[in-house]
Amino acid sequence: RILILDFGSQVTQLIARRVRESGVYCEIHPFNKVTADSLAAFGAKGIILSGGPSSVTEDGSPRAPQAVFDTKLPVLGICYGQQTLCEQLGGKVEPGDHREFGRAYVDIVADCALFTGVWAKGGREQVWMSHGDRVTRLPEGFRVVGTSDGAPYAAIANDERHIYAVQFHPEVVHTPHGAQLLKNFTHGVCGCLGDWTMAAFKAQAIARIRDQVGKGRVICGLSGGVDSSVVAALLHEAIGDQLTCVYVDHGLMRLGESEQVVSVFRDRFNINLVHCDASELFLGRLAGMTDPEAKRKTIGALFIDVFEAEAKKVGGADFLAQGTLYPDVIESVSVIGGPSVTIKSHHNVGGLPERMNMKLVEPLRELFKDEVRALGRELGLPDDMVGRHPFPGPGLAIRIPGQEITREKLEILKKADAIYLEEIRAAGLYDAIWQAFTVLLPVRTVGVMGDSRSYDYACAIRAVTSTDGMTADFYPFDMAFIGRVANRIINEVKGINRVTYDVTSKPPGTIEWE
Ligand code: XMP
C-alpha cells in the first residue's frame, strides 16, 4: 500500500485514483497528521507528497514530517510536494518569473526509473503544470532528468535513496503518460504487486463485515441508487439472513424503479426486503406545498420517521448499514484555517443510528464511486443499476418546480422521463452523461393537435456532463435527437404539448431546477 500525504491540492484525489487503478491500495492523509508511529503502523511501501496551494517560500508553510525521510521509504513529490521535499533536503525554491499553468512540455535529459517504458532521453513530452514557484537548486544526491521552460528541474531523481519528484502533475489526464509514471513509482520503485482488485476487496470486505457484525442483525436503507444497492448486495453475501433491507417508497421515484428494486433484491438476491409503500403519506403531506426548501424538508423528515418506524417493526437490529464513500470521509487540508474535517452526511437516515442506538456498518468507506460500481458488477448487480445516474433524495418532487405535486403530474412526468431516458440509452449516450431528466414546467401552453386546440403542460429536458456534480455543462445533443425526443413525448404523453431544451451550465445554474 501507498500513503499519499495531502498538502491541499485540488487534485490529490486523482493521485489516489490513478494509484488504485494500477491495482495498488492507497490512502490520503493530511500532511500534518503523520507521525513516525502512524507511518510504521500504516505499513506503506512508498509515500507520495501531493501538490498544494501554499508557497514553500512563505513562513509557516506546510512541510512533510521528518519521519517521511527517516523511514528510507521511496518518496515521490508532486508540484508542492517536490518543492517542500527539495527545501527540506537542502535545495532551494524561489518564486519563478515564468509561471506555468496548463499544458507545458518537458525535455527528457536523462533516463530514470519513473520514465521506464514511456519516456526516454532526448524526448519532449507533454505534461500539465500549475505552479509559480520553482526549484532552483537541487539537494545533494539528486540529478535532473527533465526540464521545462518554467522549471529547470521539472523532474529529478535521487536513485540511491529512491526519492523522485516532478514539478508537473502526473495524476491528471492532461499529462498523457502520467498514469504510467505513477505506476512506475508504485510498482517499479516501491515494489507493489498491483494485486488490489475488486475481487480481492470484496473478499476482504466480507471478512471484515463478518468480524464486525458477528451474530448481530443489520438493517439497511435501500434507495435504488448505486451506493445503497451495493451495500445491500455485499452485506447479503457476507451475512445472509442477518440482513434486512427497508425500501421506503415515497412515490417520487421514476417509472418502474420501485418494481426493479423489489425484483432485484427480493426475487433475485433473495434478500429480506421490506417494501414500504408510503406514497399516500408523502403526497398527503406535500399537498399544497410549492416552495422547494419546504418540499425538501418535509420529504427528508418524513423519510426518517417512516424508516425509523419500519426499522422498529423489523426489530432487534444492532447495526445500521450506510453507503458512505471515501470522498465523504477524507480529511481535507485547509491550509488557511488549519486542517479541517469535512464529513458530509448525505444520507436520508442521518442522525438515526444515535437515536435508535445502533452501530454503523460502512463497508464502502474506502472506495471511490467508480470502484463502488466495479464492486457492484463483481457482486452481480445488473449493469443498469450499477451505472445509474445520480438521483436526488426528494426525487421527482423537485422536478415539478414551483407547483403542487399531484399524482396526475407525477404520472405525466414519469412517462416523459422514461421516453427521454430510453432514447438516450438507444443512442448510446447514457454513460457519457452525468444526469439526464425531464422537468414538468408550471405553465400550460397552447398547441394544435389534429384539428383541435390543445392547452397542456410544457416540459424541459435537461442533460449535463460533470465529474462531481459541483460544476456541470449542458450536454450538446444534436438537434435531430432533440427533435425525436420532443416528438415522442408530445405524441405519447397525454398532458404535454411542448418540449424545451435546457442549455444552462452550472454555475450559474444548478443541475436540478429547484
Ligand atoms: P444541484 O441542483 O444543486 O445538484 O446542482 C447537485 C447534485 O445534487 C443532487 N441534488 C440532491 N440530492 N437531495 C439529494 O440527495 C437533494 O435535495 C438534492 N438536490 C440536488 C442533484 O441531483 C445533483 O446530482
Image: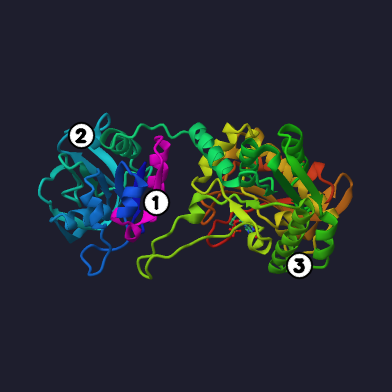
Q: Is mark 3 within 8 Å of ligand 1?
A: no
Choose top left, top right, bottom left or bottom right for residue 209: top right
The answer to whether marks 1 and 3 mark residues whose Cβ atoms lie closer than 8 Å is no
- Ligand 1 is in which quadrant of the figure? bottom right
Asked if disc 2 is less than 8 Å from ligand 1, the answer is no
User: Which comes sooner in the sequence, label 3 or label 2?
Assistant: 2
Observer able to see residue 128: no
Residue at 83% over, 51% down: 495
User: Which disc, if any, is residue 28?
Assistant: 1
Q: Which amino acid does label 3 sit on?
A: Thr
Q: Position of residue 183 (x, y in %)?
A: 33, 36
Q: Can residue 166 be seen in this view?
A: yes
The furthest residue to the front: 215
Distance in Å between CA atoms under marks 3 and 2: 62 Å
Q: Could you tell me which quadrant the N terminus lies in?
A: top left
Q: Which numbered marker is on residue 290? A: 3
Name the amino acid, label 2. Gly
Q: Name the residue under label 2.
A: 123
Q: In which quarter of the image is residue 157?
A: top left
Q: What stretch is highlighted in magenta?
A: 10-36
